[in-house]
Amino acid sequence: MARAQETFNKKEKEKKRLKKREDKLKKKLERKANAEKPSSLEDMLVYVDANGQLTDTPPDPSQRVKVDAESIVIGIPKKEDRDEEEVDPIRTGKVSFFDSSKGFGFIIDAVSGDKHFVHVSGLIDEIMENDKVTFELERGQKGMNAVRVSKQ
């Protein structure tokens, strides 16, 4: 009967694997022996200072800030509580691109410089590129759309 072929290369790989395992075990035992164990709960506590940094010294009680839990608002403010961004709903702008065969284009707002999508269904007058127009904004599926668009 033939024995399993054990080549020189296999023996070397096995020796390396066993040596690696032994070194790992030695390092583990060395770390355990040199580890500094905290003696009490106080040594294990970490505090956060006024700047948000972690520190081992407790904060000064005289600098404590009293927060009223009732004043904390969680959630989105209601529409009537928010400041009204737009006073005048009618905006002015310039048509940067309009494809009449496809029926859509883009208008650049004169005040903010934002680009707004415009569809042929939102037009009052026919428009072409570089026309100065007035329009209103409505929320669409992918952002704000220009509607009720007319030439100036």
Image (cartoon, grey):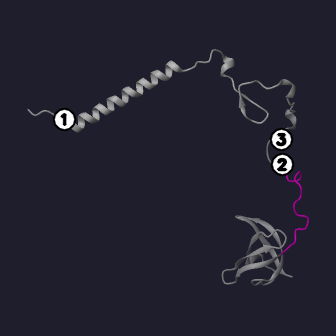
Q: Residue furthest left?
A: 1
Asked if disc 2 and disc 3 are in contact, CB closer than 8 Å, the reply is yes
| Residue named by callout 2 | 77
State the image coordinates of residue 105 (x, y, percent, origin top left).
Answer: 71, 77
SS for tag 2?
A: loop
| 97 left or right, relative to 135 | left
Question: In x, y percent, where is residue 118?
Answer: 74, 74
Instruction: Provide the residue designation for mark 3.
Output: 73
Residue 35 at x, y percent in the picture = 54, 21
Q: CA distance from mark 1 to mark 2?
A: 76 Å
In the image, which residues are magenta?
A: 78-92
Q: Give the residue drawn at x 23%, y 38%.
A: 9
Instruction: Tell me the crowding category of disc 1: few under 14, some 14 to 19, or many 20 or more residues within 10 angstroms, Cα based.
Output: few
Q: Hey, what amino acid is under mark 3?
A: Val
Query: Viewer-proximal residue, 69 or 41?
Result: 41
Label 1 near label 3: C-beta < 8 Å? no
Residue that lies at the very extreme toward the top in this rendered image: 39
Q: Is residue 6 left or right of residue 47?
A: left
Give the quadrant of residue 66. top right
The image quadrant where one finds the N terminus is top left
Between label 1 and label 2, give the one nearer the viewer: 1
Amino acid type at mark 1: Glu
- The residue carrying mark 1 is 6
x 86%, y 33%: residue: 67
Which secondary structure, mark 1? loop
Please give the name of the residue rendered at 45% of the width and 21% of the height, measured from the top-left corner. Answer: 29
> Closer to the camera: disc 3 or disc 1?
1
